[in-house]
Image: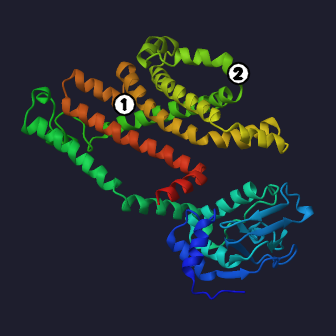
Amino acid sequence: MEVQAGQEHEARAALRESAPFRDASERLLERIAAVARLVRVEQGARIYGAGEVADDLYIVASGRVEHVFKREVGAREALKRIGPGGVFGWAGLLLGQSARLASATAVEPATLLRIPAEDLVKILESEPVEGAAVMDRFGQMIQRDFTVPTFLAQVRRLSGAPLTEEMSRFSLTMYRISLWVKSPRPYLMMIGFAIFLGTWYLAVEVWRLPRFRDMPGLTVVVKEWLSPNPTYGLSVYTAEYYQHIWVSIWRVTQAFFLATALGVPLGLLMGWSPRFKEYVFPIFEMLRPIPILAWVPLAIVMFIATESAVIFLAFLASFFATALNTMLGVQSIDESYVRAAHCLGAKRWQVFRHVIIPGALPFIFTGLQISIGVCWFSLVAAEMVSGQYGLGYVINTSYVMVRYPTIIIGMATLGIVGYATSALVRIAGDYLMQWRVRELALSEG
């Protein structure tokens, strides 16, 4: 018999015990509990039969239920006993599936939470980030706990205007921004900058500490940087300043994309093929520790054009970081995923494409963030030696000509531009790994 709808507390407790809703927010649980109903069934009572309309799903609050798949479904575990926290009756959430795939019977007196499938989907659609995460957990639960063939265990996508691809990404971005603003991180960041700048000002201009007496002060650097008529000829008002920035960005772009194009495939192959790694990795490890400045003479000999030598030197450190992190990403993948793909009939190249590459992506983008950073400091070293323009050239020339404020301007500009390029790499990673971003956003919340 059906229990009256006022027992939201018991309904929320049942939801919280189930795998798909375990990490859901209280607000989402309240909304789902409001459309759900608690149902008590006697021992031996038939809850539904195979082939009936799959218009709702159930969560076991207490008691036990026997769940039996139809033979034609082909489940490896046709009969399952489901206890408290277990979910069944989820066929209505599968793509193109409106009929029950199994029958369900109470093997002892049980209390069940019955949730209308369409109402649940509408609620999840209105919560793009959490809704998609709940649907993902349903898919994982179905394939893990019920071992239904993959073509059946595809939880349908949430549809409607709130969950177009563009809106989903926008909602996810706004959700993460709101979490960031509500967290102490932005305010701690501002405090950190204030402490750093305050210490610089006090050490140089107020206390005049011995180690800092020849350094330019904060006020001197800011005035020079923002001056329409800079004393040393470089500020935000001079065209030369932006020419140096553009030249450095263009060199880093070429070096970074070349390092990515060569480093990622090499790392994938070293991680995927033990034989290939035996040939290549010893040489790779021998070359990797060599400092960039040690390559300068060879770079000048190999590349007659100065520009090519600078790009080559910036490429080297970036290439090693990218390849190594990619290889570690492949090696971090659980071997059981590869075996499972082979058992399902996947060919070697299909395993590589659908298991190895997606599994290594988090490591690859971590490597790319490291790569863009080392690309910048390698570029600066290269520009100091053989450049004619660029931020490294500015820093080195300013030191030789005793233009200390300009050195700080070049360093600060380098930090800002380097941070921006690293952020672009993170954005690209978030775009290609929406599943990971969604998990991180929910874990932050």
Give the quarter of the image for residue 283: top right
Q: Which mark is residue 390?
A: 1
Residue visible at 50% across and 71% down? Answer: 26
Is residue 245 left or right of 66 when viewed as pictured? left
Quarter of the figure with residue 59: bottom right
Residue 423 place in picture, x, y as percent: 45, 46
Question: Of helix, strand and loop, which one carries label 2?
Answer: helix
Q: Choose the circle earlier in sequence order: 2 or 1.
A: 2
Q: Residue at x 35, y 22 (%)?
A: 384
The one of 418 and 63 positioned closer to us in this rendering: 63
Residue flagged by tag 2: what amino acid is it?
Phe
Q: Position of residue 106 (x, y in %)?
A: 78, 74
**Circle number at residue 276:** 2
Q: Is residue 19 above or below residue 348?
A: below
Judge left or right: residue 264 versus residue 74.
Answer: left
Identify the colour scheme used. rainbow
- Closest to the camera, between mark 2 and mark 1, is 2
